[in-house]
Image (spheres, rainbow, N blue to C red):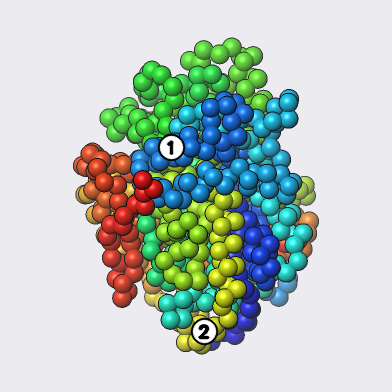
């Protein structure tokens, strides 16, 4: 078997997005020897760089009636009462301070002429509450990265893929992974470990997120034995390109494009008819359901989509130009360079998986159910419930990233390093090297990925039912048991993306199974989980819990934490 | 010459550090970018071509910078014309493998 190197740290952060970098900064604030392992370069990987500029915080600039209590009520209500209320409370109470810190780190926000924050309204907010980060998610992560680089005693491992956690007597004591840059495996001994790897959108084909969002952190938590909840709750962004193929999944900022006071473009079906009810633009779960019904009832496009039609706008060309210049300048420039002009042509759009609400269950201290293991950001669950308001994802990275860093440090201060056995390392190495073993009827990992994505789009999309999900589950289990063992890739060497992809496919297949089993278990319609065969919403919201018991998947309920 | 095909040459680095150029023929598609073309290469022609498929997708983060016919460009926002001849080489910086460079 291969050699491997050993690293030691007080706090290990896995993931280099907004939550992970904020967690590392906090662990450093607490005087911890900190190591951050990120699958790609910070600010050039993960989900944060592609986030739109919205970050929600109740400064009450646009409307003095806004405050943290209103923000809290919006989260609980729009989350369809599935959020853990202690987590929502922490989010609204702490985000304002986190925004001031971000400014200290050098992150820039758009301001009004009087120097106060510019705040805009997005659906689901009682009052305008979204701040506008200059350069969007990239501006946020780039500022955080610079702050991290100013710190001493932080070891940053980029292009470093963690594939497994190690436990000793029920406590997480470190992790194992492949450094793509040098092609060497590393075992990292850590007193406390933080998962901040983002979501699992890559289970689906139609998604607007980055291709590295393979849910590694959710898998790591699950495989180590932590409680994982609400996996069925994939949040759809209502409008991404469904076609042309080259831009499939590129999102269109519908909040600007469809809002009556902004561009006022219209959603139409294949008959050219508007289908949204009169009134303000609905929140995401309602909007995407309306779009889905058009497709379901045969009024969609050939790519199971609908159109955004600019010709029906009530706005003058001058007004349209002004809004595009102010809010859509960069995407518009990019689309036009590819020969697509949103002013002139209908755009074929469909809901796309935008955020995954499920993940590793945390409490307000960002602790998972396993001692020594913490989680933050999209990797953690469930702060938002069954639906998330625009602007709360970047907010959660800062609030819970800081909390994870703080409480992980608190834990690490009381612990000594525990070294793990050579046995678990050789098991892990064997898993990696299995992909390189020559076998008859060998197949490529990307073929499996394609079939998994098609299966998830078809049966775990915005519309789910017993029959479809059962069939999908059989397909996924078949891929896991019969196709995955046939995968053959070239192993070894530096920056072997083919090898990494094979491991990602194995991880996503496991997560796909958890997601479908969770979807079958939730026999109700709630938020983004839309089941025409169970259209009612139960009176007592419950988390769907998946947990690993003796290598079996056990699906049960777990109570939602209420404050009142 | 078939104008529906894009001819792409990709600079590869091997274990022995020898530079070589691989040539692929990719069918053109509407709104094709260098990035979507490379994904096609990975999925249908050669899964071992290494590039940074991580991106903001909107031309701000520079993650997908490569040299296209000698000029540094962002793959996600660089259109590919039907019938084009394209040479892809790594962007300036410390080369790791194929089209992947170190950001630090």
The residue positioned 63% from the left and 25% from the top of the image is A324
Q: Is residue A326 visible?
A: yes
Q: CA distance from mark 1 to mark 2?
A: 45 Å
Please indicate whether residue A53 sits to the left or right of residue A366 in the image.
right
The answer to the question of whether label 1 and label 2 lie on touching residues, with beta carbons closer than 8 A, is no
Q: Nearer the viewer, mark 1 or mark 2?
A: 1
Q: Chain of mark 2?
A: A
Question: For this rendering, which residue is in front, B2 or B37?
Answer: B37
Give the answer, above or below, for where A86 lies relative to A124: below
Residue position marked by numbered label 1 in the rendering: A73
Quadrant for residue A181, please give it.
bottom right
Question: Compared to A91, does A33 lie above or below?
Answer: below
Chain identity of mark 1: A
Q: Position of residue A348 (x, y in %)?
A: 46, 31
Residue located 21% across and 42% down the image:
A533
> In the rendering, at what x and y percent does residue B9 appear?
67, 54
Name the residue that disc number 2 marks.
A420
Q: Nearer the viewer, residue A121 or B28?
A: A121
Q: Percent from the top left, x then y, of residue A250?
A: 53, 40
**Chain-order first, disc 1 or disc 2:** 1
Does the image show residue A461? no
Q: Residues within 10 Å of mark 1 (few under 14, many from 20)?
A: some
- Label 1 residue SS: helix
Q: Secondary structure at mark 2?
A: loop
Percent position of residue A311, x then y: 51, 16
Q: Is residue A429 left or right of residue A546?
A: right
């Amino acid at each position: 078997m291969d050699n491997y190197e050993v690293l030691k740290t007080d706090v290990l952060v896995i993931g280099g997005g907004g939550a992970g970098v904020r967690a590392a900064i906090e662990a450093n604030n607490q005087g911890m020897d900190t190591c951050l392992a990120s699958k790609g370069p910070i600010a050039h990987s993960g989900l944060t760089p592609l986030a739109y500029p919205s970050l929600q915080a109740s400064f009450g600039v646009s409307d003095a009636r806004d405050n943290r209590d209103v923000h809290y009520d919006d989260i609980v209500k729009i989350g369809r009462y599935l959020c853990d209320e202690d987590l929502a409370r922490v989010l609204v109470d702490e985000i304002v301070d986190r925004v001031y810190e971000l400014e200290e780190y050098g992150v820039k926000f758009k301001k009004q002429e009087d120097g106060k924050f510019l705040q805009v309204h997005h659906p689901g907010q009682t009052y305008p509450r979204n701040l506008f980060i200059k350069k969007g998610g990239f501006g946020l992560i780039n500022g955080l990265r610079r702050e991290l680089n100013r710190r001493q005693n932080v070891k940053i491992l980029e292009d470093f893929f963690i594939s497994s956690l190690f436990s000793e007597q029920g406590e997480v004591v470190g992790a194992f992974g492949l450094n793509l840059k040098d092609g060497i495996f590393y075992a990292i001994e850590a007193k406390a470990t933080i998962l901040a790897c983002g979501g699992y959108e890559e289970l689906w084909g139609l998604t607007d997120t980055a291709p590295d969002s393979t849910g590694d952190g959710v898998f790591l938590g699950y495989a180590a034995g932590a409680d994982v909840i609400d996996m069925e709750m994939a949040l759809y962004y209502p409008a991404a390109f469904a076609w042309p193929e080259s831009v499939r999944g590129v999102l269109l900022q519908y909040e600007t494009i469809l809002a009556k006071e902004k561009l006022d473009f219209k959603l139409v079906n294949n008959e050219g008819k508007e289908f949204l009810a009169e009134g303000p633009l609905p929140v995401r779960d309602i909007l995407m359901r309306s779009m889905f019904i058009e497709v379901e009832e045969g009024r969609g496009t050939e790519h199971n989509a609908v159109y955004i039609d600019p010709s029906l706008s009530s706005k003058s060309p001058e007004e349209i130009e002004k809004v595009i210049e102010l809010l859509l300048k960069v995407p518009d420039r990019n689309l036009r360079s590819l020969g697509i002009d949103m002013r002139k042509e209908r755009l074929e759009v469909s809901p796309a998986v935008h955020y995954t609400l499920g993940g590793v269950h945390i409490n307000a201290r960002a602790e998972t159910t396993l001692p020594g293991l913490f989680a933050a950001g999209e990797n953690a669950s469930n702060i938002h419930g069954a639906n998330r308001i625009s602007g709360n994802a970047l907010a959660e990275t800062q609030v819970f990233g800081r909390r994870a860093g703080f409480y992980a440090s608190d834990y690490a201060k009381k612990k000594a390093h525990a070294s793990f056995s050579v046995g678990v390392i050789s098991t892990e190495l064997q898993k990696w090297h299995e992909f390189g073993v020559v076998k008859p009827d060998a197949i490529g990992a990307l073929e499996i990925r394609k079939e998994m994505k098609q299966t998830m789009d078809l049966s775990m999309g915005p519309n789910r039912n017993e029959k479809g999900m059962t069939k999908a589950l059989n397909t996924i289990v078949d891929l896991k048991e019969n196709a995955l063992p046939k995968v053959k890739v070239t192993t070894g060497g530096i920056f072997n993306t083919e090898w990494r992809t094979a491991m990602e496919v194995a991880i996503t297949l496991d997560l796909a199974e958890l997601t479908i089993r969770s979807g079958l278990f939730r026999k109700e319609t709630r938020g983004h989980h839309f089941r025409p065969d169970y259209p009612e919403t139960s009176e007592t919201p419950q988390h769907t819990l998946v947990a690993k018991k003796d290598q079996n998947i056990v699906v049960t309920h777990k109570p939602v934490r209420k404050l009142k | 010459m078939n104008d529906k095909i894009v001819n792409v040459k990709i600079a590869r680095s091997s274990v022995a550090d020898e530079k070589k150029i691989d040539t692929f023929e990719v069918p053109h598609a509407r709104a094709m970018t260098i990035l979507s073309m490379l994904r096609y290469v990975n999925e249908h022609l050669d899964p071992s071509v290494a590039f940074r498929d991580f991106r903001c997708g909107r031309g701000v983060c520079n993650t997908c910078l490569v040299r296209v016919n000698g000029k540094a460009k962002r793959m996600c926002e660089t259109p590919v014309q039907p019938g084009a001849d394209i040479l892809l080489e790594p962007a300036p910086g410390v080369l790791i493998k194929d089209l992947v460079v170190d950001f630090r």
